Image (cartoon, helix red, strand yellow):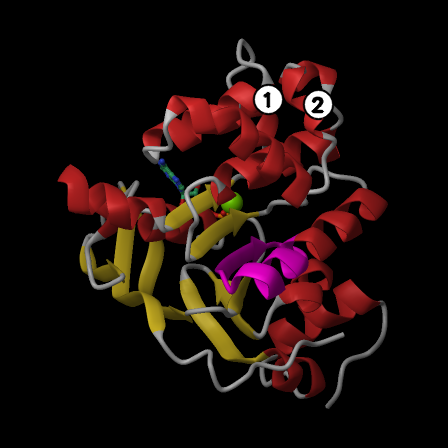
């Protein structure tokens, strides 16, 4: 299944230009360009160690590149401070691979979402209703807001992480292997949730996975990363029908269990 892009997906939201990043002698990213436009899903695939999470952290401003530039809404995401910085920061959100690790175990799941609302400036009296609305939006019974993360299933915890990301009304959500820790059936329902939220709100995703089978379900455009370099890039439909590189063909065959063309 591929998803057609439409003409509205033209505004550059995230623009990463020729970034390199070393960790000691290890070159994790080597001249990577990546653009995400409003409302689109860009899939980033590659095997473990190819540099995907490093690119995610650069996009989120959690790391700075050695060379090259990262711009979100025209600004350096690692330098978003003050009131205007916070406003931009709210538009850039993250769904991690291991949501249980990213949620405070001492906070009820509703409190975690309420905390994001508080940072966003939602008045205290409006937060309970906003939390319930966000739970509803991600397909969770609002009664689950009273539970601690350990009292929720893996799929439910990941939905709480999505609700927390949505709390600030983001334009872009970076999802780093958001379904990798989940069972296949739970995975599929989370992917449906993410695509449904995009259709409802127009948000964009940078969707990262080592699993091309997962990326196939959500991405309009795909980049294949290998050893810190973009090996291949293109509209999802083209990449699926005519992968240019043998490495992409191998990933595709592994994902589908069928020989890829050509
Ligand atoms: N904080 C770090 N310190 C040292 N090396 C790192 C660090 N983060 C990532 N690396 C290295 O950079 C490379 C890319 O890692 P990463 O971006 O996590 O890949 P992926 O997410 O595709 O598995 C790997 O070789 C990894 O060991
Ligand atoms: Mg990773």
Measured along the vertical axis of the image, is residue 225 above or below residue 128? Answer: below
The structure residue drawn at horizontal position 57% and vertical position 23%, both measured from the top left corner, is 110
Precedes in sequence: disc 1 or disc 2 = 1
How crowded is the residue under tag 2: few (<14 C-alpha within 10 Å), some, or many (20+)? Answer: some
- Work out whether residue 5 or residue 25 is closer to the camera in this orientation and state it: 5
Q: Residue furthest top?
A: 106
Residue 122, magenta (yes or no): no
- Work out whether residue 141 or residue 50 is closer to the camera in this orientation and state it: 141
Q: Quadrant of the C terminus?
A: bottom right
Q: Residue furthest front?
A: 125
**Does ligand 2 reach within 8 Å of label 2's beta carbon?**
no
Judged left or right of residue 21, residue 48 is right
Which quarter of the figure has residue 32?
A: bottom left
Measured along the vertical axis of the image, is residue 72 above or below residue 248? Answer: above
The structure residue drawn at horizontal position 74% and vertical position 39%, both measured from the top left corner, is 182
Q: Tag 2's secondary structure?
A: helix
Q: Is residue 32 visible?
A: no
- Work out whether residue 48 or residue 105 is closer to the camera in this orientation and state it: 105
Q: Position of residue 216 (x, y in %)?
A: 69, 68
The structure residue drawn at horizontal position 65% and vertical position 37%, both measured from the top left corner, is 159
Q: Position of residue 232 (x, y in %)?
A: 50, 77
Reading the image, the residue beneath label 1 is 109
Q: Is residue 133 visible?
A: yes
Judged left or right of residue 139, residue 98 is left
- Work out whether residue 116 or residue 133 is closer to the camera in this orientation and state it: 133
Residue 210, magenta (yes or no): yes
Which quarter of the figure has residue 162?
A: top right
Q: Tag 1's secondary structure?
A: helix
The part of the chain drawn in magenta is 194-211
The structure residue drawn at horizontal position 19% and vertical position 45%, both measured from the top left corner, is 85
Measured along the vertical axis of the image, is residue 130 above or below residue 9? Answer: above
Reading the image, the residue beneath label 2 is 144
């Amino acid at each position: 299944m591929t998803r057609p892009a439409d003409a509205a997906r033209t505004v550059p939201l995230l623009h990463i230009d020729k970034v390199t990043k070393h960790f000691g002698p290890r070159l994790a990213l080597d001249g990577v360009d990546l653009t995400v436009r409003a409302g689109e899903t860009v899939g980033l695939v590659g095997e473990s160690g190819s540099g995907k999470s490093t690119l995610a952290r650069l996009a989120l401003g959690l790391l700075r590149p050695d060379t090259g530039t990262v711009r979100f809404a025209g600004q350096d995401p690692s330098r978003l401070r003050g009131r205007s910085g916070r406003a931009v920061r709210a538009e850039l959100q993250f769904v991690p691979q291991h949501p249980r690790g990213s949620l405070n175990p001492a906070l009820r799941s509703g409190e975690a979402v309420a905390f994001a609302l508080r940072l966003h400036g939602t008045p205290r009296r409006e937060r309970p209703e906003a939390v319930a609305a966000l739970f509803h939006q991600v397909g969770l019974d609002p009664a689950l807001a009273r539970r601690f993360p350990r009292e929720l299933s893996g799929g439910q915890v990941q939905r709480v992480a999505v609700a927390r990301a949505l709390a600030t009304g983001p334009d872009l959500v970076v999802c780093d292997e958001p379904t990798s820790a989940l069972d296949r059936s739970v995975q599929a329902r989370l992917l449906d949730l993410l695509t449904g939220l995009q259709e409802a709100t127009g948000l964009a995703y940078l969707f990262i996975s080592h699993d091309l089978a997962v990326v196939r379900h959500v991405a309009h455009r795909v980049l294949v990363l290998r050893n810190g370099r973009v090996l291949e890039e293109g509209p999802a439909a083209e990449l699926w029908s005519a992968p240019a590189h043998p490495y992409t063909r191998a990933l595709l065959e592994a994902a589908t269990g069928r020989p890829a063309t050509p």
